[in-house]
Image: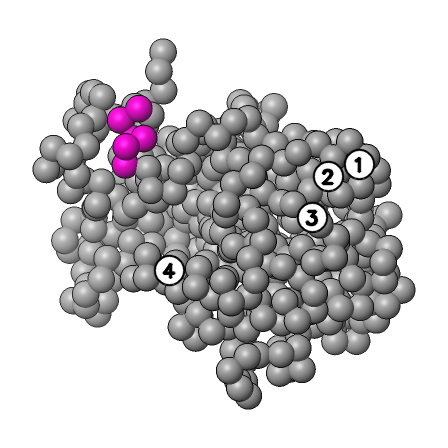
Amino acid sequence: MEKLYTLPQAADLLSMGKHVVQKWVRSGQLLPEKVSENGNPLFSADRLKSFDTEGHLRNSGEPIRCKPYKDYSVVELFAGAGGLALGLEKSGIKCAMLNELNKHACATLRKNRPNWNVIEGDVREVDFSPYKDKVDIVTGGFPCQSFSYAGKRLGFEDARGTLFFEFARAVKEIRPLICIGENVRGLLQHENGRTLEGMISILDELGYDVVPTQVLKAIFYRVPQKRERLIIVGLRRDANLKFRYPTPHKDLYTVGEALKKGRLYDCDVPHSEGQKYPKRKAEILAHVPQGGYWRDLPEDLQKEYMQASFYLGGGKTGMARRMSWDEPCLTLTCAPAQKQTERCHPLENRPFTVREYARIQTFPDNWEFCGSLSEQYKQIGNAVPVNLGEELGHTLIEALNYYYSPEKVEIPQMEYYMPLKAKQQQVKVKQQQLAFA
């Protein structure tokens, strides 16, 4: 039987807002395959293909699965609780060193992987020279910080004082074949795109061609969550490397599949601690249906819960938000009980527990988190989803296999997989900004 997609799932697949898809349905531009018993439209993949703006439903082949031709290693900065590192390990890449400032995150890394070389402390004090020409990949989810622009072109020295400079310094001292930066989608528009332009020009100065940036949507990489990460890939110019981004999966995973036995996990989610809502808040959230938010409350409760915000503009769709059992979760935050970004359990009037949070980020159940309850939520909420990291790892292995293997198995040539010089990339950034406007 052909798989049918709900309206929210169709919106995700089309990379459009739900209101846009609803408008298409009302105008007759997009016809549903059928209507559910509840009156909700359901769409087939064929119907959605003609509206696909980012190619997620294209016949792009099977997801990349590569075994390493030899041992490949990675140095990771700003490692957090290890989501990306664990994902890369699952793909077959070994961790040579991880650096993290937060002591609780470091305790998490050491508890789960005693064999990993975890360097705790300020990245500014780390000497990367012992890894020169010995490590294949450098990764880092550096914070998004503004630069001081001394001239038309931002150089390596101009980035001093930012944490991106420390990432670039690690790349300069190690000289890996590939460097990977990951960040929030908002980096595309930070300082009108100049911050990203500066990062690209610095990597170009260091001898790295930057592949056109892509925003990877985690829901297409076996993650039951609508998280997005901007990926910046630099290929060392003298190495003749080729790279392509992970192939999107066509199946989406839901909150129900994260918390119950099924395709993602072989058992129901284990019991664990979790934050609680105050009594009155739990009473109000009891009136919110699955997939709903504050506008689904009776008007008197809307006014009580929203207070002055009730009279202001904007959707505020994250407030009093209950997740749906049959849809991917919204992006997890660091505080699941916070009023502006609730992530309420689909059935119970409470936030997700720690283990539920971890499953939505695709951590295995045996991955333990250290520190207080709030610290554990913070570590999980800030992590790169493990399965997304694994999918990225296979593409990195493919690129390194091409470099090291004598057979030189060809990588499919698609224009946006090929490296661009910094100047060309700046044009790409401008185009992306216009598309998001």
Q: Are marks 1 and 2 in contact (CB under 8 Å)?
A: yes
Instruction: Give the Cα distance between marks 1 and 4.
Output: 36 Å
Amino acid bearing label 2? Tyr
Residue marked by disc 1: 405
Q: Residues within 10 Å of mark 4 (few under 14, many from 20)?
A: few
Percent x, y of residue 215: 47, 51
User: Vertically, is 172 above or below 184?
Assistant: below
Amino acid bearing label 4? Gln
Q: Which label is found at residue 55?
A: none
Tell whether 350 sits left or right of 133.
left
Residue at 32% across, 57% down: 435
Front residue of this view, candidates 212 and 190: 212
Instruction: Give the Cα distance between marks 3 and 4.
Output: 26 Å
Instruction: Give the Cα distance between marks 3 and 2.
Output: 7 Å
Q: Are marks 3 and 2 in contact (CB under 8 Å)?
A: yes
Q: Secondary structure at mark 4?
A: helix
The mark nearer the N terminus, 3 or 2, is 3
Q: Which label is found at residue 402?
A: 2
Front residue of this view, candidates 414 and 47: 414
Residue at 64% across, 40% down: 395
Instruction: Give the Cα distance between marks 1 and 2.
Output: 6 Å
Percent x, y of residue 177: 75, 54
Q: Are marks 3 and 4 in contact (CB under 8 Å)?
A: no
The mark nearer the N terminus, 3 or 4, is 3
Tell whether 138 sits left or right of 191.
right
Res. 403 visible in picture: yes
Residue marked by disc 4: 431
Span shown in magenta: 46-51
As drawn, the residue found furthest toward the left would be 27
